[in-house]
């Protein structure tokens, strides 16, 4: 996906998030974020969009100290005003990304072809994942994520996030487990793409020292294949194995247990 496609996805996902939240009880708990209510989720995403806009719109080249999560939640607008506040911040971010020059120079925290590409991609996925959270808080089944966006988000998670040194270690059964992941519904497949960075297959080696991923197929202890949206939400801990159907390679209890042992403790840290 290119920058324009990420901005389009950000626009679409943010509008849907706000639409869902307007029709829901802001006091409803967010099942995938146990400490949050929907109002807290809105406070978070409203802050994050404004945080990203600051770097993009003003080309800030150094990381700026920001308040912690508790402060963010406590200083957001009144709960009844948060949907409008989120909509305004989201629209401002979409505008800032659309107006930014291709050679934008600003602070980033993930590897990417350019700062603009990083911020557009990261905010598209930040918003898509929290859109799903909002739907779950509203008691809705998650709207499937577009396959192209979902496959791109799997790649960002595995290559960009888990490509960084881990902040904590997790015990892995046997010391090392290799996962093979394959998307079944990416239009054209990886082999038919003229974009070499696009992938529909990843080989993921998990050890107690972290996660190492390469694009493409390879020998694995556990091979999992499924729709892009399902794999995306599974890897981001937004859907459980019990809630998903049609994932190939996880039909028996041994495979499911191994996957949960290996991937269950994995979480994303920002620093």
Image (cartoon, rainbow, N blue to C red):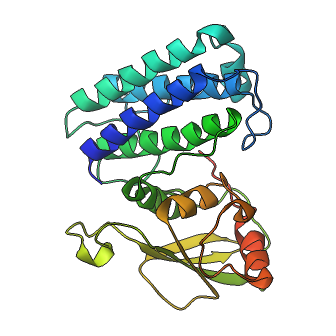
Nearer to me, 119 or 259: 259
Residue 177: give x, y in percent of width and height: 67, 82
Give the side of residue 176 with respect to residue 19, left or right: right
Nearer to me, 257 or 158: 257
At 25% from the left and 36% from the top, the residue drawn is: 104
Residue 139 is drawn in which quadrant?
Answer: top right
Q: Relative to 138, is 239 above or below?
A: below
Nearer to me, 72 or 208: 72
At 58% from the left and 42% from the top, the residue drawn is: 132
Q: Taking the image as drawn, is residue 115 in sight?
A: no
Nearer to me, 32 or 63: 32
At 55% from the left and 44% from the top, the residue drawn is: 129
Residue 15 is drawn in which quadrant?
Answer: top left
The C terminus - image quarter: top right
Residue 248: give x, y in percent of width and height: 59, 79
Q: Relative to 94, is 5 above or below?
A: below
Residue 23: give x, y in percent of width and height: 60, 22
């Amino acid at each position: 996906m290119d920058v324009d496609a990420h901005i389009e996805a950000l626009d679409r996902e943010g509008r849907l998030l706000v639409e869902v939240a307007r029709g829901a009880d802001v006091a409803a708990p967010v099942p995938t974020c146990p400490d949050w209510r929907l109002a807290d989720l809105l406070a978070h995403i409203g802050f994050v969009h404004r945080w990203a806009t600051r770097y993009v719109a003003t080309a800030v080249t150094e990381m700026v100290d920001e308040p912690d999560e508790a402060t963010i939640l406590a200083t957001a607008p009144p709960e009844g005003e948060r949907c409008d506040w989120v909509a305004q911040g989201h629209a401002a971010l979409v505008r800032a990304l659309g107006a930014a020059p291709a050679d934008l120079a600003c602070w980033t925290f993930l590897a990417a072809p350019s700062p603009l590409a990083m911020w557009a991609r990261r905010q598209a996925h930040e918003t898509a994942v929290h859109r799903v959270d909002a739907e779950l808080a509203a008691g809705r089944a998650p709207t499937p994520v577009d396959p192209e966006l979902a496959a791109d988000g799997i790649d960002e998670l595995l290559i960009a996030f888990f490509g960084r040194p881990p902040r904590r270690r997790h015990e892995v059964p046997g010391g090392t487990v290799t996962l093979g992941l394959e998307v079944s519904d990416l239009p054209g497949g990886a082999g038919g793409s003229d974009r070499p960075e696009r992938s529909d297959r990843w080989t993921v080696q998990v050890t107690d020292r972290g996660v190492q991923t390469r694009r493409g197929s390879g020998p694995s202890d556990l091979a999992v294949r499924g729709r892009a949206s399902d794999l995306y939400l599974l890897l981001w801990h937004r859907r459980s194995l019990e809630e998903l159907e049609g994932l190939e390679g996880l039909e028996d209890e041994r495979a499911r247990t191994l996957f949960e042992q290996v991937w269950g403790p994995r979480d994303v840290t920002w620093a």
